Image (cartoon, rainbow, N blue to C red):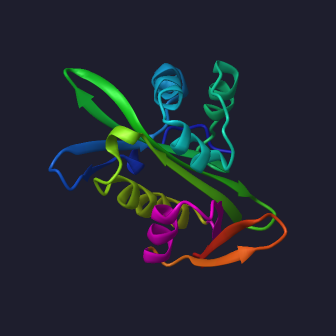
Amino acid sequence: MSLVYPAHFETVIKMRDGREAFVRPLKPDVDREKLFEMYSTLSKETNYYRFLNYQPVTRWIVEHWCDVNYDDKMALVAIVNENGRERIVADSRYYLDKKTGEAEIAIVVHDDYQEKGLGTKLLSYTIEVAKKSGVKKLYAYLSPTNRRIIHVVKKLGFTVKWVYEVGEYGAELPLQ
């Protein structure tokens, strides 16, 4: 388990509108309030697509999300500067099962920053981080009504299949 902050995973993503987002691993003590603000201001639809059901955000849940170790629990956040204030506008993360080498991946982009290419680029970068960290396979469950993410994961090389047992799409991407 690694608790050393991996600064080498910091990068900048340029959105289609020309604005830039600074992407870095989550810093729990620094990002807790900003993460709560982002999640608590998502539309109900975006919240539903992220959790596959509507989940009101509480401080306890955000505390749980801030429990990262940069090893089997990794989170990357996209930060923009709005009027001199840093704002988290996207969160991408994976949880690794060390026994199998497989990790569940998830992403959410705040409604204000959707349709700007940020989600695709952040997800692509998270895949790169996972690969460099030794993850063997990424997987996710997707709502059948979330056409945007289904399109994005297919574009990034995931195989997408209907999972009858859960009534959702399953997406898989071998990394090794």
Location of residue 165 (image quadrant): bottom right
Q: Residue at x 78, y 68 (%)?
A: 100
Magenta segment range?
135-155
Quadrant where the N terminus sits is top right
Q: Residue furthest left?
A: 18
Is residue 130 found left or right of 67 in the rendered image? left
Q: Residue at x 63, y 60 (%)?
A: 143
Is residue 129 found left or right of 48 in the rendered image? left
As drawn, 170 above or below 143? below
User: How many numbered circles are shown?
Assistant: 0
Near-viewer residue (77 or 43) = 43
Near-viewer residue (31 or 171) = 171
Q: Position of residue 13 (x, y in %)?
A: 28, 52
As drawn, 154 above or below 143? below
Q: Residue at x 58, y 50 (%)?
A: 49
Q: Position of residue 116 (x, y in %)?
A: 28, 53
Q: Position of residue 71 (x, y in %)?
A: 63, 49
Location of residue 155 (image quadrant): bottom left
Taking the image as drawn, is residue 136 in sight?
no
Is residue 21 found left or right of 125 in the rendered image? left
